[in-house]
Structures are given as structure tokens and as C-alpha cells.
Image (cartoon, grey):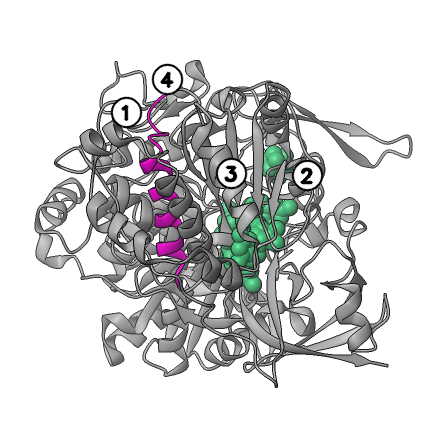
Amino acid sequence: MEATLNQGQAGESGVPGGTTQCPFCSVQCKMTIAEERTPSGRPAFRTEGKPNAASEGRLCVKGMNAYQHAASRERVLHPLRKIGGEFVRVSWEEALDTIAERLSAVQREHGRDAVGLYGGGSLTNESAYLLGKFARVALRTRYIDYNGRFCMSAAASAGVKTFGIDRGLTNRLSEIPKSGCIILAGTNIAECQPTLMPYFNSAKENGARIIVIDPRKTGTAALADIHLKVKPGTDAALANGMLKVVLDEGLADLSFIRERTKGFAELKEHLDRLDLDEIAEMTGVDKESIREAALAYAKASTGMIFTARGVEQHSDGHLAVRNFLNLVLVTGKIGREGCGYGAVTGQGNGQGGREHGQKADQLPGYRLIENEKDREYVAGVWGIDPAELPGKGVSAYEMMELAHRQEIKALFVMGSNPIVSNPNAGLVEEALKGLDFLVVADMFLSETAKLADLVLPVTSYLENAGTLTNLEGRVLLREAARPAPGEARHDWEILCELAERFGRGDKFPFRSAEEIFEELRLASRGGVADYYGITYERLRKEEGIYWPCPSTDHPGTKRLFEDSFAHADGLAVLAPVDNRPPEEDVDEEYPLLLTNGRVLPHYLTGVQTRRSPSLAARAIENFVEIHPRTARRHRIEDGTLVRIHSRRGHVVVRCRITSEIREDTLFVPMHWGGVQNVNLVTNPALDPNCRMPDFKVSAVRVEALS
Ligand SMILES: Nc1nc2c(c(=O)[nH]1)N[C@H]1C(S)=C(S)[C@@H](COP(=O)(O)OP(=O)(O)OC[C@H]3O[C@@H](n4cnc5c(=O)[nH]c(N)nc54)[C@H](O)[C@@H]3O)O[C@H]1N2
Ligand SMILES: Nc1nc2c(c(=O)[nH]1)N[C@H]1C(S)=C(S)[C@@H](COP(=O)(O)OP(=O)(O)OC[C@H]3O[C@@H](n4cnc5c(=O)[nH]c(N)nc54)[C@H](O)[C@@H]3O)O[C@H]1N2
Ligand code: SF4
Ligand SMILES: [Mo]
């Protein structure tokens, strides 16, 4: 890379460069970065954690080494067009003109909805907002969705139904040490948000009991006083068991239930009918442990529950989360210090990315595209007739199905690698190969970008200014620390240039991220995720502001639900949830359950972390965790290659024998593509409430490859 660090110079925003935020997970650790020269004169970088309210100056190994992918020689630096099967460098003019011509031709011939857009939770709020606006105002297609569908949709829809609002954490991180009992359900903080571990360690030092619900003894479970080694896909039933113990032991907070919730009578009636022995049998967790965990949480004077993808990525993920929210509510543990709930958001802007309109049914500020008032309001801000706005589209995987059926004929991907991250990846590959036209805006030739007709080079976190909202719902400003390398452009710049070519340039007149944010403030004003009171100037002064923040003199909302919930009547909604075995249970042909997730050094589909030599070296290939007895039964030795089959396909990985996992369960990380892609076997069954795929349970068989 020729570009040099912008430290000490005025960046686009007029503020000295050198300070940035990690591009990876939802903690959004702040850091400084300085360019140095090695003795041989090669450029090198030094990163240091910068004190802030979330990470308190800590960085994990991914954050420390993130600059390596940004500085990688593999960055795409010029637009690339595929001609005769080979990528050829073309000018931006040619690239953008080609996109406009091809997408217009598809829309002319097959209708507006024949073009789809696919976004991501790594995009800044400004780019995510503009992508949604671009879909509705420039392309006027109903088909837009994003990778957060696979990430946040179950927890988000559960939060909306139960509380009337969805914000990752209801409290600040700094309240965790004040909690007397913490339940970590399907969340592996130690590997996925490592800089948050000290908060939980402090809680423990202060006497908190920690309960971890996970089929594996993870680094997080090592912290636990009680580890419930649940059978994958049975969290809803486990929560029912805990709820039943709470009610049977007279530990429900009846005055909280009466004053702040509705639906208790139905919930109680439902729980009375359930049998704890059956629940123990179904979940693989013994009755005594369920009881012990329920008592520990209910008897503590303060408590918090956190869920993440282990609970949520199921075809009943929405209901599983709702059942943990039932537990929060019947014990009255929310809305005060040390009491609350957290859906541990995943991507850097997993929170903001789900608020401002790249989801199929959404407009900015969590407004709904099929609500007349919401349409009118946003159309007013955008200066268009509400009738011009399309209706709602479908979820991410369903867009892939439409592409497979050739109803969607052209796709524009910005900030995702869908061919690796979608369930049933075999079908997704066929779908993308069958498109008339595929455009990918990315920093690298990801597995998806390799299939594209056109690849647009974009700026990385070091070069791109904008706001991101962390897992606490705190909006943070990330300034640009370096100039763009080569001809890379910001995502939002690309959208503005394209809008011009669709005759809508007047609606996209933006010259900086801040100008877009100024419009986003208005578009979100009065909505659930109200950013109106937040400005770049305030963000620079105040480090970060919690939404909702309805006016510039409003301090931001640090703790939700102190006096009332966000439903019109102010009450939270309790809902009975059925015990349900996993969608795809084991049988003779497929006798094992496969689940999947993450390891510390890699991030999502690995496009970025596999290009950081220091990270790649820590885990160079995919693997499967298997219990020693299961391995013996299948004559599998440690370190051998195995093929894992499901009804969808198969994946080839190396064996790691470990007694930390359940005997009936296998675990494979998600960070590799090609034959090592675990999504070749995962189940695309969708949750009817939120369209989350059933990623975390597939029935499989394993076969040793000699
Ligand atoms: N190192 C690293 N950190 C990351 C990411 C990354 O790719 N790498 N990605 C980021 C993103 S986008 C996200 S969404 C988050 C994800 O963060 P997490 O949700 O914490 O990550 P996972 O590893 O997918 O799943 C968490 C745990 O769920 C367990 N689990 C599997 N099935 C079940 C089940 O049925 N029930 C229960 N109770 N547990 C189950 C797994 O064993 C695993 O330990 O991490 C973020 N941080
Ligand atoms: N089996 C299984 N599958 C899963 C999951 C699981 O737990 N198990 N988890 C799911 C979850 S929670 C998630 S979040 C998804 C994520 O899945 P993906 O969306 O595929 O995530 P990434 O690998 O981060 O891909 C992001 C791509 O965007 C590029 N990129 C990064 N930053 C930017 C930017 O600012 N602009 C642009 N234009 N491009 C950028 C990166 O180089 C990369 O190629 O995977 C889901 N898939
Ligand atoms: S990956 Fe997450 S925890 Fe690690 S440095 Fe980045 S933001 Fe912080
Ligand atoms: Mo995620």
C-alpha cells in the first residue's frame, strides 16, 4: 500500500487521524494506530487500546491485528469487470455506467423487483441508511435485506414483542459488576467479545453467581458456577423448566408482574401443565441443575440475562428468547441498577445496521415500511410521494431462493459474503451463479466477489468515517485515520454516484458522512430508534450517546424501562412458549447433532481475518470438536480429516477430540469457505416469526477419511 497514515493531519472530518475503532465485533473498542518503519524500511503499524466506556482501553488479538488486512496486498484497489471469465481493471466511469445500464435493463424487462440489494452490519449507519434509501428511492425495488437477518432477527423481534423496543443491552456495560447473578445463554463472550470478560470477572469477584448455558464447556463456561450443558435447540424448554421452578417455589415478583406486565395468568397456566422430568429429558440437563440455576437467579437481589446466537439461531429462536425474557420479567429483574437483559449484538454495527432501513420491512429509525404513517413521514423527509415507496420484501435467505428460481435476476451486495454465510450454501452458490448480473462492493475478492460480474473496491475501517452503534445502543463516531488506498471509494459515495445515474442524484447530494447523518437524524426523528438529538459535534465531545435521544439537549438513554416499557400501555408482554424438540432431530442415518459458531482469532466468513497473517496463523483450517467416546465409536483419531454429512450436503474438516463437548453434539466453526464451509450442511428452515434460519442444529453423520 502506498497510502500513508494520516496521523496529525486534518482528515475529512477536520480532526487529526490516528484514532479509530476495531472493525470487528459489537464492543467497538477504540484504539490509536501509528505507522512506523521496520529497520529494513517496510511500513509497520502499532495499535494501542484507547480508554473508553466500553472496552476501557482493552483490545483483543483481532483488534490488535486488524490493520493487517487493511494493509494487505490483496486489497482490491480498482474496479474490476469480468470479461471472458477473467477480472479486468476498468475505470469507475465504466463500472458505474455498466451497473446502471445492466440494472436498468433487468428492471425494464422483468420489473423493478427483479433487482435485489443485500447489505451488512459492518456498514456504518450512514451507508446502511443510504443503502435502504437507494433501494426504495433510486431502484424502487422491494427486495433488500442484510446479513443481520442471520444475526439479530430473533432477539430483535422478541424484544419488540415483549418490550416494544429492540436495543441490544437494556443497561450500560458498567452495570454488569453490580449484578448478583448472571445467566449467559448461548453466548461465548470469552471468544466473541473478549474485552468484556473483565466486567464478568468483576461481577464474580463481587460475589455474583454465573450460569452458562452451552453444549460446550467454552472459555466463558470456565467462569461459571453452574454450567448447563444443554442439548442444542432446546433452550426454550430449559427456560420453561427454570420458570416453573421459580413459580413453584413462590419466587415470582408478583407486584412487578401486576404493575408492569400482562399475560401472567396464561403463562402460569401453561407452566402448570409442564413436567420438569420431561424437560430434563428433552434438554439433557438434570432436574437438580435446572433447579439450582433457577433458584440462584430468582433469589439474587439483582440479576441479568444475556443471550446470543446459541439461543437465537434456531427456527424457534424468537420464542426461545421470549422465554428468557419471561424469566427476566417474572423475577422483576429489569429497569434498575444491575438488572436487565442483553442480546449480545454481533457485528461492529450490528445494532445500528438493524435500525435504519436495510431490512426488508423497515424504514429508518425502526419505522415500518407497511405502516401508512411511517411511509408518509419518511417520504416527507426524502421529498417523494409515499406511493412511490415499494412494499416489504423478503428475508436474506428467501432472496437467495428467489434468485435460485430466477425471480431475482440481478443482485448488488455491499458488506457481506452471502455464499459462505447463508445456510444451505450449495443452493446459494447455484443461485448466485445463475444471476444475470452480480455486483459486489468489497475490500477483497471474497468467495462471493469471485462470482461477480463487477467488483467495486471500498474503503476499510481505517479510511472510512462514520457512526456505528455498539451493543449497548451507544452511537460512536469513527473518524478516518488514513486516506483511501488506490481508487477505493466509500460505500456511501458509490451509492450517491449510482443514484445520479438512475436520475435520482437530487435525493443523494451528500459530500460527507456527516451530511448523510444530518438527514438520518431527521428520518429517525420520533421513531423508536430516535437519533435526532445526536450530532457529530456532540459525539466528538461526549464519546458516545445512547439512543433514544430525541433532542440535542437530551442526555441519551442509559438504562431502558425504569418506569415503563415501550408498548403504548407501558406494559411488557409475557407469552407462553412450548417445549419443542429441535426441528431436525437425530435418527439412524444422521445420529449426531451439529452446531457451529466462532473461535477467537477469526471473524465471520474469515475474508478479513484470513488476510491478517498474525490471525490466520492461529487457526489455519477448519475443524470439528468431537467427544472422545463419539470419536472412538466412529474410529476417528485426533487430527484426522472427516467428512460430515447432512441432508443438504457435506463439509470436510479436521478432528479435534475434546471432552468439553456433549457426546451427542459436534461443533464446527463458521470461518471458512469452499469444502470447509459448515453452511454446506446447515438447515435453512426459517423461524416463522423472524425468518432466522435454523443454523445451530442439523442432524448429521460423520465419516473418517483415511
Ligand atoms: N472471534 C469472533 N468474535 C465474534 C465474531 C466472530 O466471527 N469471531 N462474530 C461476531 C458476530 S457477527 C456475532 S453474531 C457474535 C456471536 O457471538 P456468539 O453467539 O457468542 O457466538 P457463537 O460461537 O456463534 O455461539 C455462542 C455459543 O453458542 C453455543 N451453542 C450452540 N448451539 C447452542 C444451543 O442450541 N443452545 C445454547 N444455549 N448454546 C448453543 C456454542 O457452543 C457457542 O459457544 O460474535 C461476534 N464476535
Ligand atoms: N453456520 C453459521 N452461519 C452463520 C452464522 C453462524 O453462527 N453459523 N452466523 C451468522 C451471522 S451472526 C452473521 S453476522 C453472518 C455474517 O456473514 P457475512 O455477511 O458473510 O460476514 P462477513 O464475513 O463479515 O462478510 C462481510 C464482507 O464484507 C466485507 N466488508 C467488511 N467491511 C465492509 C465495509 O465497510 N463495506 C463493504 N462494502 N464491505 C465490507 C468483508 O471484506 C467481507 O467480504 O453470518 C451468519 N452465518
Ligand atoms: S474484536 Fe471486538 S473485542 Fe476484539 S478488539 Fe475488536 S471490538 Fe474489541
Ligand atoms: Mo452476527
N-term mark: 1 or 4? 4
Q: Which mark is residue 538?
A: 4
Residue at 42% over, 15% down: 542
Q: Mark 1, mark 4: which one is toward the viewer?
A: 1
Q: Viewed as shown, does residue 375 lie left or right of 296?
A: left
Q: CA distance from mark 1 to mark 4?
A: 12 Å
> Magenta span: helix, strand or loop, mainly?
helix
Q: Amino acid at mark 4?
A: Arg
Q: Which mark is residue 549?
A: 1
Q: Quadrant of the N terminus?
A: top right
Q: Quadrant of the C terminus?
A: bottom right
N-term mark: 2 or 4? 2
N-term mark: 3 or 4? 3
Q: Is mark 1 within 8 Å of ligand 3?
A: no
Q: Position of residue 63 (x, y in %)?
A: 66, 36
Residue at 22% over, 38% down: 523
Q: Position of residue 426 (x, y in %)?
A: 55, 78
Span shown in magenta: 316-336
Residue at 41% over, 81% down: 404
Q: Mark 1, mark 2: which one is toward the viewer?
A: 1
* Relative to 102, residue 146 above or below: above
